[in-house]
Image (tube, rainbow, N blue to C red):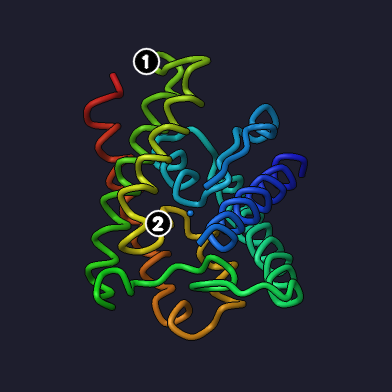
Amino acid sequence: MKKYLAEAVGTFVLTLLGCGTAVSLACGSDTDTIGGISGCHINPAITLGCLMTKRISCKDAIWYMVAQTVGAIIAAAVLYVFTQYSGASFDGTLTGANNCNGCSGSQIGGLIVEVVLTFIFVLVVLGTTDAKKGAGNFAGLAIGLSLILIHLVGIHYTGTSVNPARSIGPALFEGGIALTDLWVFIAGPFIGAALAACTWKAIGEE
């Protein structure tokens, strides 16, 4: 239960600070404090990649994803309250919700962006955290830097999700186009994660 709670708290912090930054500055954040408890997935796409490479059980993977989504929804609720009652004027969405507007509204375009970026991100995670070939204590640095670059590349097109939970929470409160496009930000990261897991199994595992 501690592992699941850690994933919920971690995803709450990721969503609140990451989406909050995007809303307030009209731009991400991460946390690794729960890494020693659950492994700090805080992303269903990473959990899927770990499941496919047999680093986590099916039971834990399901509960991780549930906890991550719950954490993201709570974070989006808090952020919604922040923005609704702050009296400030915000450009864009009030919850940092993702959409495909940067791809001229094309859901297929957004899907391609999310698949490719998540593929890169999860492949970095799987490679740097590998018990034998990983980056050891530098894994967090490599993952953090890659996530920054991924956000810089993708933010114009989709707002950059690469994380289904991070998209589900804000979309539930944003509604409109965010809900219409939500499937892109669930399917895209999962497809990208699956491709990354297959690639790592082909090139990284002995």
From the top left corner, tell me how far across and down residue 81 is, in percent: 74, 72
- In the rendered image of this protein, does residue 141 appear above or below residue 9? above
What SS does tag 2 mark? loop
Q: Is residue 10 left or right of residue 184?
A: right
> Who's the residue at 41% across and 24% down the image?
128
- Outermost bottom residue: 176
Where residue 2 sits in the image (x, y, percent)?
77, 40
Above/below status of 35 relative to 48: above
Which residue in the protein does label 2 denote?
A: 160
Residue at position x 53%, y 37% from top? 56
Badge 2 amino acid: Thr
Measure the C-alpha gap from mark 2 to mark 1.
28 Å
Residue neighbourhood size for the residue with mark 1, other residues' Cα within 10 Å, grouped as few (<14), some (14–19), many (≥20): few
Q: At x 67% / y 72%, what residue is drawn?
A: 88
Rendered location of residue 100, percent (x, y): 33, 72
User: In the image, what residue type sits under mark 1?
Assistant: Lys
The residue nearer to you, when weighing 100 against 183, is 100
- Residue at 27% over, 58% down: 113
Could you say which is closer to the camera, residue 194 or residue 15?
15
Image position of 156 (left or right of 145): left
Q: Which residue is under mark 1?
A: 133
Please state the total of marks drawn on the protein image: 2
Between disc 2 and disc 1, the foreground one is 2
Quarter of the C terminus within the rendering: top left
Query: First in sequence: mark 2 or mark 1?
Result: 1
What is the quadrant of the N terminus in the image? Answer: top right
- Residue 147 locus on image (x, y percent): 42, 40
Q: In the picture, residue 71 is in which quadrant?
A: bottom right
Name the residue nearer the viewer: 91 or 142: 91
